[in-house]
Image: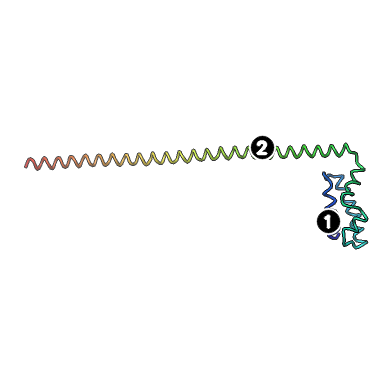
């Protein structure tokens, strides 16, 4: 099948709102007919296909003219409900993912804040220990000075 025939068939498929099993069978038969016609006549232009089969919308018109209108309407409504269901599920999944990510971020921030507070407490407690040791050392120093000064006084 040459490119012109493939383009004509793809243009024809665009006029089918729903392509299910029956539509696929119909399009396959049409494709076989067009393929044979293209091979026999060596078609190089879409105008030749238009003369033989009509514009691409004519293929869809001939299919739908043979089918009950109520059946087509049911198929279209069913497809509409399926699309609405899929869109709703995608929206629900997006909302759930957003809530989960927000919760995870807040939880992660809380853990980081706890680590910072704990590290500050550890730092503060180690500084307090150092200050206490300094105070103890300074007390000893003062006692030593007092001791020295008392010795000096006695002498």
Looking at the rendering, in which quadrant would you find the C terminus? Answer: top left
Residue drawn at (9%, 43%) of the image: 152
Q: In the picture provided, is 98 more to the left or to the right than 89?
A: left
Residue drawn at (82%, 49%) of the image: 14
Disc 1/disc 2 C-alpha distance (Å): 39 Å
Q: Secondary structure at mark 2?
A: helix
Task: Quadrant for residue 41, please give it.
Answer: bottom right
Looking at the rendering, in which quadrant would you find the N terminus? Answer: bottom right
**Residue 93 against residue 13 in the figure, above or below:** above
Q: Position of residue 151 (x, y in %)?
A: 10, 41
| Nearer to us in this view, 58 or 13 | 58
Disc count in the image? 2
Task: Quadrant for residue 130, please give it.
Answer: top left
Task: Quadrant for residue 91, please give it.
Answer: top right
Q: In the picture provided, is 153 more to the left or to the right than 89?
A: left
| Nearer to us in this view, 100 or 72 | 72
Residue drawn at (24%, 39%) of the image: 136
Q: Secondary structure at mark 1?
A: helix
Q: Residues within 10 Å of mark 1 (few under 14, many from 20)?
A: few
| Nearer to us in this view, 71 or 144 | 71
Q: Are marks 1 and 2 in contact (CB under 8 Å)?
A: no
**Residue 73 against residue 53 in the figure, above or below:** above
Q: Earlier in the sequence, mark 1 or mark 2?
A: 1
| Nearer to us in this view, 132 or 61 | 61
Residue drawn at (88%, 47%) of the image: 60
Q: Which mark is residue 43?
A: none
For disc 2, the marked residue is 92
Q: Position of residue 35 (x, y in %)?
A: 89, 57
Q: Residues within 10 Å of mark 2 (few under 14, many from 20)?
A: few
For disc 1, the marked residue is 7
Work out which residue is located at the far left of the displayed protein and give it.
155
């Amino acid at each position: 099948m040459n490119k012109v025939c493939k383009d004509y068939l793809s243009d024809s498929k665009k006029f089918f709102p729903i392509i299910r099993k029956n539509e696929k069978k119909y399009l396959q038969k049409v494709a076989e007919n067009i393929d044979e016609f293209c091979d026999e006549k060596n078609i190089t232009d879409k105008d030749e296909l238009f003369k033989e089969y009509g514009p691409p919308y004519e293929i869809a018109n001939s299919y739908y003219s043979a089918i009950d209108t109520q059946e087509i309407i049911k198929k279209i409504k069913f497809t509409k409900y399926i699309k609405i269901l899929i869109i709703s599920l995608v929206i629900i999944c997006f909302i759930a993912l957003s809530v989960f990510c927000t919760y995870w971020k807040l939880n992660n921030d809380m853990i980081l804040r706890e680590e910072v507070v704990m590290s500050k407490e550890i730092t503060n407690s180690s500084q307090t220990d150092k200050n206490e040791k300094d105070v103890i050392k300074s007390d000893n120093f003062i006692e030593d000075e007092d001791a020295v000064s008392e010795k000096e006084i006695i002498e």
